[in-house]
Amino acid sequence: MTDSNRNSTVDSKLLFESQYLFVTEDGEVCLKQTPRQKERLLKTIDPENLQDELDALQKEFEKLEDAVDSFLSNRDELIKRTEDELKDLFDAKRADLQNADAAGDFGKLLEKLDQALEELISEKKSGAEKQETSAEAADAAKPDKSVVPEEQETSEDSEAPEKPADPSTVEAEEATEEPEAEEPEAEEPEEPEEPEKSEDTEEPDPETYYRELADKAEQLVKMTDWPYVTMELENIESRWNEGPDAEGVEIQAYRDRINNSKESFEVKKQAHFEKQKQIRQENLEKKKKLLAELNEIIEQKNWTATREVGRIRNKWGQIKPIPKGSEEELQKKYDRLISEFEDHKVDRLVKKKQKEEENLVGKLVILDKMDALVQKLPSDASGWKEVQKEMDKLHKQWHKVGRVPPEKKRETWERYHKIQDQFHQLRYSNDEKYKKQIDKFYSQKKQLIKEAEDLINDENLARAARKVNKLHRRWKKVGNLPQKEENNLWDEFKAATDAFNEKKSNNIDQLRDQEEENLEKKLNLIKQAEELKDSEEWDKTHDQYQNLMKQWKAIGPVPRKRSGKVWKQFKGAMDVFYERRRNYFKEVKEDRKENLEEKKNILFKLEELTKHSDPIQAVKEAKPLQEQFKKAGYVPFKKKNKMWKEYRKVCDVIYDRFRAAKSAASVVGEENVSEYSPDDIAEIQKKQKQASKLSKQIDKLGEEVLQMKESLSYFKPSGKGSTLLDEVHQKLENAEKQMDEKEEELAELEKEIDRLKREAGSND
């Protein structure tokens, strides 16, 4: 059926129509046109199998949804890609969706991909800007350790430089490590990682530290994970209080940015919860409406309304959040009505079987008429027009008759196709006008096949790819041939287009040409690196090498045989410069022993506060000491990391006890807080989390048990054994056993929580 013919039948000659597709009386399943996709023929089916085919298409779409969710869940791997690589990956995923044989809301899936891609690119740009800004700020305050061997970095003889190390320098120099010879990626060094901000890191640059907190707050408020963002904003507050001394740097602007971010987040969160409340109320009304529809079906005793009930079931399952306190009552009413409908299933199936037998008789009568018509076909061109009308009439009658018994379906369809083939062959032999039309269609489709095969030799892949899409559209516009010829030509056409697509994906020749171009570009970078290696403008030359490294990475692969050699040349020039630069900074030294002693005294006082009976008061006393620690200045380089690690460790203990005390009211009640120690509260919190997890597992098992019990009602009573029925019973027994065990475990855990509360209270 051509597109024009298909469009003309949309309103009047459809077997089925939904939000996403329609099925013509000839069995053509077509996706509807949307703003994101054109109308597309999915497949041609046997109308008797309509429901089974629709169910299969829906299941395929569910698989696509799972595939998209799986693809997007791997966010850590995606964020490592370049922007161009991300766009290519997402384009490939969109192409998979647009060519998939499935039925569902493709627009929603495509929109989900677009939004995820936009977020990833935005996150990458934001991260790149942060890293670049952080590198520039830290470059002036930290010594370079980028290519220092591991033994030199940990040596007791290493002297403290005048400036702290530059994290971006470390990135550039660590990236210059020589790749293994057998690795194909040797010509492209991996992106060196920044030193992690852990307990072992150096004391951060103040402006960078507070700016990054403000940046992180602004990024967090763009997210919609409300508990996570709330927790992270609290962590930012703690880190602000624990941060390094500003040392004369103006940080109020960063404080204001954090405050603004928090206010913005609270407004968004409140609006979200109001929206959720509204959604729950709307969902409640939707479920009430579905109950009314289901109740009407029961009252009218419309026991054949399987499709309507199936639609209600699907919608009921899709409507999730409703106001608390309403779900149990609604579910009971729903289950009662569904149970009543299913009780009449046996009677309906008996009637269905009888109807199938009647349909078989009707189809056999139509086949006899078709056979008789073929036997008396005219032997010349006269009369074929009237014969065709009669055959079309019988054809329509055939498709109007419903399903036949499954065991007879194949036999009846084979006889039907055989008669149709005989009719077309005889008409082709005796009706010159019909013969010319069929020959024209055949010739047009053979030409399309030839054009598709010629694409293999087209050097311009972009142009050829556009031709493939046009060829598919032209194929659909050509009229249909008799079924056998149509299928054979389609197989040839698809094989040709598949071959081209494979060539497009694996075009080695163009890749090699690109590798040669990349080699010339990298040789030019080596020349520039050689010219810079003797420079004594340490900061400026470092920035130039950083820029050269970025260009090197952006160029792409070179021929494998030259890969290791050109990398060694480039790395060698950089090594010369950074070795000279490191030796220069080793000559700079400053005595900071007094600062070390002062900070040790402050640490001693902070450690005493970790044992304070009042964690909240301990924080108040710790803040002035933290300020003194920050103002004490730098310590000898060899002691710097150790002092910072000890400082962070003791501060973490103080603020962890503070946070535990603040959350005590939610655990034991505000009126009982004074009766419990921070350690008691921490243990009770741990047990409550375990109990909450068990409770969710029990709820999930309960839903599975309910579903399996419902599925048992679908089995027709029979004296014979049923493997499937036995499996359902076994699964049900296992689920109920697991649920009993977890309920016992939960009861024991709740007893343990009560015991802890009693003992903690009595001890105090």
Image (cartoon, rainbow, N blue to C red):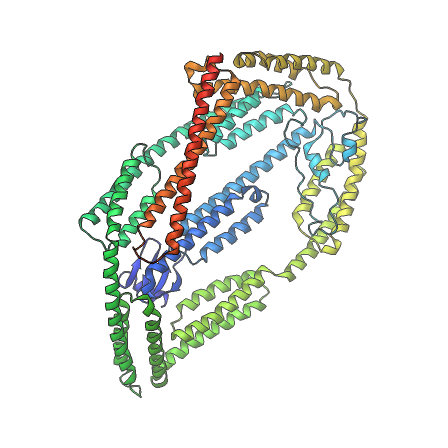
Which quadrant is the N terminus positioned in? bottom left
Would you identify the image quadrant in which residue 669 lies?
top left
Q: Is residue 531 left or right of residue 247?
A: right
- Residue 567, position in %: x, y? 75, 48
The image shows residue 166, relative to residue 566, as above or below, that is: above
The image shows residue 44, relative to residue 295, as above or below, that is: below
Q: Is residue 387 visible?
A: yes
The image shows residue 171, relative to residue 48, as above or below, that is: above
Looking at this view, is 588 or 249 the one in front? 588
Furthest-left residue in this view: 300
Q: Is residue 32 visible?
A: no
Q: Is residue 314 left or right of residue 633?
A: left
Looking at this view, is 131 or 285 the one in front? 285
Would you identify the image quadrant in which residue 141 lies?
top right
- What's the residue at 34%, 73% (across, down)? 411
- What's the residue at 75%, 36% (across, down)? 147
Q: Total of numbered circles in the picture?
A: 0
Would you identify the image quadrant in which residue 622 lies?
top right
Furthest-front residue in this view: 719
- What's the residue at 22%, 53% (across, down)? 303
- Residue 155, position in %: x, y? 79, 29
The image shows residue 120, relative to residue 62, as above or below, that is: above
- Residue 241, position in %: x, y? 57, 19
- What's the residue at 65%, 25% (across, down)? 205
